[in-house]
Image (spheres, rainbow, N blue to C red):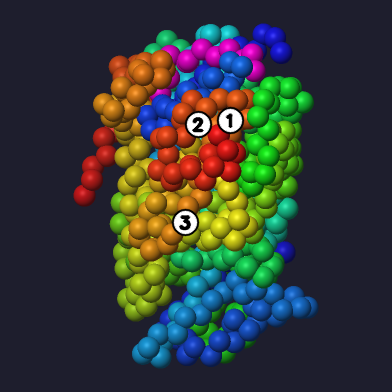
Amino acid sequence: MSNTGKTLTFDPKLCNGCGDCEKACETRNETISPKSIRMVKNDDGSALVYFCLQCDQPLCKAICSTDSIKFNESYQSYTISDNTCIRCRSCSLICPYDGVFYDNKENKMIKCDLCGGSPRCVKVCKLGALTFNVSELTSSVKRNRIAIGLSNASKSGLLNITTHKAEGDIGFFTNSVFNKSEGVRKFLDYCHGNLFTVSESAALAPMSESISNRRKTMGLCQIKRPKDEIRILTNKLGLGKVVKK
Amino acid sequence: MNNLHYSLFLGCFIPARLPHIESITLKVLNILGVQTTNLENASCCPDPVSSTFANRFAWHALAARNLSLAEFEKRDLLTFCSGCNLTLSSVNKELKENIELRNSVNDSLSSIDRNYSGDINVRSILWLLYSKIGVSEIKKHVKRPLKNLRVGIHLGCHIREDLEEYDDPSNPQSMRELVSAIGAENVSYKSESLCCASFARFIHESKSLSQVDEKLFDMQNAQIDCLITICPTCFLQYDVGQLEVNIKLKKNYNIPVLYYTQLLGLAMGLTPQEVGLNFHRIKTKRVIEKLNI
C-alpha cells in the first residue's frame, strides 16, 4: 500500500488523554506488542503523545552503525531490521522526539511503522487529535511542531526545518523533548565545529605537553599535521568558519 | 607469517590520549611479525558520526585524501580505532563503486595534487589478529596463559560492518576466540551489545552516563575481572567514564578496562608496566593480582 506524502500528526488541543491510541497500538498484532506510541499526562490534565515523526533526514538512520534503519517504500515509513540491529540503542538516544524505544522484555527496538499504511491509533481516536493525512496543512503543521523543538538546531541548515512557530502546539514538546532538542542543537554545533577543527588544524586531538613527553619516552613517532594542505582542500570544499551564536 | 607490512593510520584518540595503547599494540604486532609504517601527513579520519552530519561530501573528500596517502605508499592501511576503520573502509568501498562520487572527490583533491584511485584495502586490528594472523598463530606466542581471568567483551558498534567479512555481525565470535586463545575465560553479561553512548554525551550527558552505568552494573553482576575493548572511544567511555559514573552517580565500580592487545601482551609474557597498565584511570590491580604477576 502506498501512502505517498501522508503523515501522522497529533494535535494536543484536541486530546483528552483517554489512552485509546496506546491500547490500539499494543493490540496491533494478534498478541500484545510493545507500544510504539506513548502518552504522557500532564498535571493540568492535558496529555501529550510521542511517536516517530518519520523525519525527512532522520538522525536515527544517520547514527545507526549497522545500517538497520531503512525507508520502507510500501509502508512509507522508516523501519528497523531486527536481524541486523544490535540493540545498541543509539537511535533511541539521538531521537529528539523520543520516537524510538527499547523494549526490555522483547529485547528489541520499537518504532512506529504506521501499521503498514493504516495506523490503528488514528482509527480509535474519537476526538481527531491523531490524524493521518496528505494535505499540505498536515505537513506544515508537522514541520512547525518540529520547528518549535528544534528551531535552534535548524540554524545550521542541517535539518531543513522551517522556524516559524505554530500557535497552541507548544505543549507537544514537553521538557524532556526540549532538553533533548537543546542537546541535539549542541551536538550539531559540535558536528560543525568538529569538521571545522578538522579543516582548520587537520585536527588530531590536541596533544598536551605531558602526552608529547610520554610519546618520546615510549619511543613513538612524532605526529605531523598537514595544516596547509588541508586548508587548501577545505577552501575548495567551501567549509567556512562556524559562527557560534 | 611473512611480508606483513601495513601503513598505519593512528587517528586522534590513540596518539593524543592513549599512547600506551599505541605502544603496546606496536610491540605485540612486532612479536607477531607485522611491520607498520606510520602514515605521515594524515589528518583526522574524519569521524563517522559528527562529520557526516555536518557535511557528507567533505567527509568523503577528507577521508579520500587519507586513503590517497596510503595508495601513494602502495600498502594496505591498518587502523587501531573502530571509528577510523568505519570512515576509511566505508568511504573506500563507496568510492570504489560510485564513479560519479569518486570523480567529484578527485576534482576536489586535484587542488592539492592528490588523487584517489581505489587500489588499497583498509584493515582493522581485529581483522589482522583474527583473520590474517589467526587464532592458532597467536596461541603459539602465549607464554603466560591468563588462567582464571574472567573477561567481559565490549566490541562496540563501529566494528560491526568490518565483521561482515570474517564473522557474524549479529553474533560475533572473533573476539571470544581471541580471548580464549590466550587462556582467559569469556564471560557473557546482559547488556553486552549496548552502545558505549559516547556520542550521546553531546546530546544528553546524563542519559549517556546512565547507559554506561547500566552496562557496568551488568558487568559487575557477571563478576568479570576486566573488560576488553577494541576501540579507543569505547575504552575511554568505560575507563574515564566509569570514574565519572562513580563520582556523579555515586557508584563504586571497579572494573579495569583493557584494549585487547594489552591483554595479549600480558599473555605473551610482557610486564604490566610494558603493556601500560599504569596509565589507566580505573586501577588495574585486580587483573595483576588475579594473574599473580
Q: Amino acid at mark 3?
A: Tyr
Which class describes the residues within 10 Å of circle 1: few (<14), some (14-19), or many (20+)?
many
Find disc 1 in the rendering and name its residue.
B266
Between disc 3 and disc 1, the foreground one is 1
Closer-to-camera residue (B119/A122): B119
Mark number displayed over residue B253: 3
Query: Mark 2 — on which chain does it sit?
Result: B
Region in magenta: B32-45
At horizontal 52% and vertical 56% (from top left) the residue drawn is B216
Q: Is residue A178 left or right of residue B155?
A: left
Sequence-first tag of 3 and 1: 3
**Decide: marks 1, 2 in contact (CB < 8 A)?**
yes
Magenta span: predominant SS is loop
**Rendering coords of residue A66 (x, y %):** 62, 45
Which class describes the residues within 10 Å of circle 3: few (<14), some (14-19), or many (20+)?
some
Position of A36 relative to B2 (above/below)? below
**Rendering coords of residue A235 (x, y %):** 32, 24
At horizontal 58% and vertical 27% (from top left) the residue drawn is B265
